[in-house]
Amino acid sequence: MAEPDAGSPLPWRTMVAAALAAAVALVLHALAVARTGTVVDGTIDWRSLEDAAVHEGASATPLRFAIAPVVSPESSLRGYQALVDEVGRRCRRPARFITRSGYAEIGELLRQRQCDLALVCTYVYVRGQHDYGLAALAAPVVRSATAYHSEIIVPAGSPVGGLLDLGGRRFASSDLLSTSGWVWPAQWLREQGRDPGAFLGRHLVTGSHDRSVEAVLRGQADGAAVDSIVLAGMAAADPQVAAGVRVVQRSPPFGMPPVVCHPLLDPALRQELGEALLGLHRDPAGRAALAQAGFDRFAAPDEALYDGVRATAAAWDGR
């Protein structure tokens, strides 16, 4: 099998929506300049805000909130900026939104204590928990659900009935450290006696779940493994997505990707962050930030919900 290819942005909306998105991007750029932020690789990195206070009396120390690229950078910025800002406001700190191109980079930021908290994929969480005690602060509840699935999708008219029918075909994954995008489907293939690297054809690593869906819709992949929450959100927003793909296989439930912190984070800050996240749904500003991110609320993590990911990760890592 060929080496995984890095995906490029694959627009899935109409030309009109693309034009609107471009206009929004220009506005966001202008706002970034006005707030003295900088735009890096299509996302806003607020390094120049580190000495600013979000409101009178705020600490000068920035709150560094990293977000894994579960969705594309442009979607991540639209969805999570308000959440990052609101958590910072509640902790009386300027908020710095950090994102990177892959899950491994976010994991390394956590390990090296270069961020205070991060929203990560479940595999990065359970592996970090095993390796150095990475701690979960809160987990999102989405449309009343506390768990998600890996879903194998194909074009609506495809004859493919499941993963085993995708041998030799083009396959899309968001990231090689994504539970739903690669770790679970690859481990499932191993359990069926298949070597995922040799069994699948060209492997397209797209960088986010929405881009994996787009790859299938545009005929650039014959199948993909995607986060069920992301797919449901895209299908609800665009009937063409709902009509264009079909789910042919589904994983067991996994606990929602949590917000985590390094175990050596200052205990007082850790408590403050936990209280801020768990209390967001109790007032209008917090509810608005949650809604923009697609969350109902945050809940205390139920560690039992991550047992399935732990078992899959242990098998995949050979532990």
Image (tube, grey):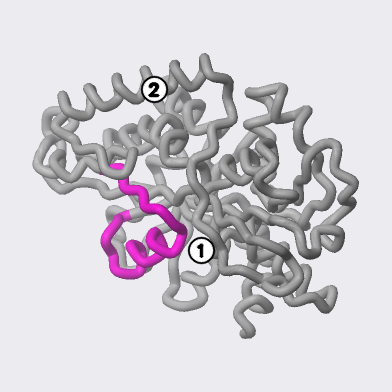
Nearer to the camera, 105 or 229: 105
Q: Residue at x 57, y 53 (%)?
A: 174
Q: Which residue is mark 1?
A: 125
In this view, 105 is above or below 224: below
Magenta-drawn segment: 96-116
Q: In the picture, residue 294 is in which quadrant? A: top right
What is the x, y in percent for residue 31?
23, 23
Give the quarter of the figure containing the C terminus: bottom right
Q: Residue at x 86, y 59 (%)?
A: 165
Q: If the image is split into quadrants, where does the N terminus sit?
A: bottom right
Against 250, residue 126 (above or below) is below
Residue lying at 45% horizontally and 32% vertically, measured from the top left: 79
Vertical side of 215 occupied by 165: above or below: below
Q: Nearer the viewer, mark 2 or mark 1?
A: 2
Where is residue 170? Give x, y as percent. Answer: 70, 56
Residue 22 disc label: 2
Label 2 crowd bin: few (<14), some (14–19), many (20+), radius 10 Å: few
| Mark 2 residue element | helix
Of 177 and 121, nearer the camera is 177
Q: Secondary structure at mark 1?
A: helix
Q: How many residues crowd mark 1 within 10 Å: few (<14), some (14–19), many (20+)?
A: many
In the rendered structure, which amino acid carries the disc numbered 2? Ala
Direction from residue 22 to residue 219 in the image, left or right: right
Residue 111 is one of the magenta-drawn residues: yes
Q: Amino acid at mark 1?
A: Tyr
- Real-space CA distance between mark 2 and mark 1, rounded to the nearest whole angstrom: 34 Å
Can you see residue 92?
Answer: no
Residue 295's x, y, as percent? 55, 34
Q: Is residue 233 magenta?
A: no
